[in-house]
Image: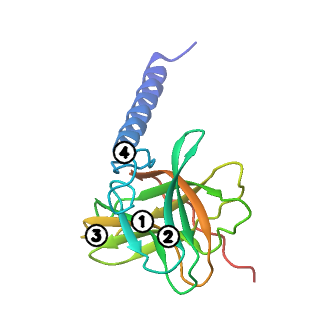
Amino acid sequence: MVDMRSCSLWMLAVAAMLAMTAAVAQDNQITEVPLVNASFDEGMDEAGVPVGWTKYSGGGVDQTLELVEVDEGTALVISDGDPGAEVGVSQDFPITGGENYRVTVRVRKVGATSAGGSYLQFRFSPSQEFEQTSLAAQSPDDFNEIALYGTPPEGDTSARIYLYCHAGPTPKVMVDNVKVEAGVEPPPPPPPPPP
């Protein structure tokens, strides 16, 4: 025979666990941070920079920012033919210090040209701490997604993302669908180095 009191206590415990799980999930909701022209579909401004973005560096020779049509709309090609200068685009947005963020961008090789030396940087302000990763495009035929995580220090209130080609190599890379999300779980730490 089932003890009604034990059954009631068990049901109460399960209900409490479900309520706590729902509260934690609600506290950790992922929200998208609005960016202007994140898919580069709004064209270029009079200075030849994608609307909503700011040109980063440039001034070298054989450096271009170009919009190209792709199956999903429009993408930006960042081309750096000058080994002595950097070029790219950036965009600022508000953040909350101490919160976890993820930036994603779709990347694609341009023909046989290497994308090596092209980067996504996520810089926080006023601390000037940053995270950075390579825009490691894998194929000229398909996009692959790059993700970068960061947690700005307490007190930081704004961030800037850069999509750029570093001085030194002369890469060319196609980028599209930039997204910033807040409230994400940070990735697990890397494994320790082998002994």
Q: Please give left or right for residue 67 compared with residue 170 in the image.
A: left
In this rendering, position of residue 177 left or right of residue 27: right
Mark 1–mark 4 Cα distance, whole angstroms, equals 24 Å
Mark identifier at residue 145: none
Q: Are marks 1 and 3 in contact (CB under 8 Å)?
A: no
Q: Measuring from the top left, give residue 136's x and y in whole percent.
A: 64, 64
Q: Nearer the viewer, mark 1 or mark 3?
A: 1
Query: What kind of residue is marked 1?
Result: Val
Which of the marked residues, 1 or 3, is nearer the chain's N terminus? 1
Residue type for callout 4: Thr
3 or 4: mark nearer the eye: 4
Reading the image, the residue beneath label 2 is: 164
Q: Quadrant of residue 90?
A: bottom left
Q: Earlier in the sequence, mark 1 or mark 4?
A: 4
Residue at horizontal 32 percent and vertical 58 percent from the top: 46
Closer mark to the observer between disc 1 and disc 4: 1
Label 1, label 2: how far apart the Cα atoms are: 6 Å
Q: Which residue is mark 3?
A: 154
Q: Badge 4: how crowded within 10 Å, few (<14), some, or many (20+)? A: few
Give residue 160's position: percent from left, percent from top: 35, 66
Tell me which numbered mark, 1 or 2, is placed earlier along the sequence: 1
Mark 3 or 4 closer to N-term? 4
Which amino acid is tagged 3? Glu
The CA span between labels 2 and 3 is 27 Å
Q: CA distance from mark 4 to mark 2?
A: 26 Å
Q: Classify 38 as above or below 123.
A: above
Q: Which residue is denoted by mark 4 in the rendering?
A: 31
> Of all residues shown, which one is farthest toward the top?
1
Task: Establish if 84 lies above or below 5.
Answer: below
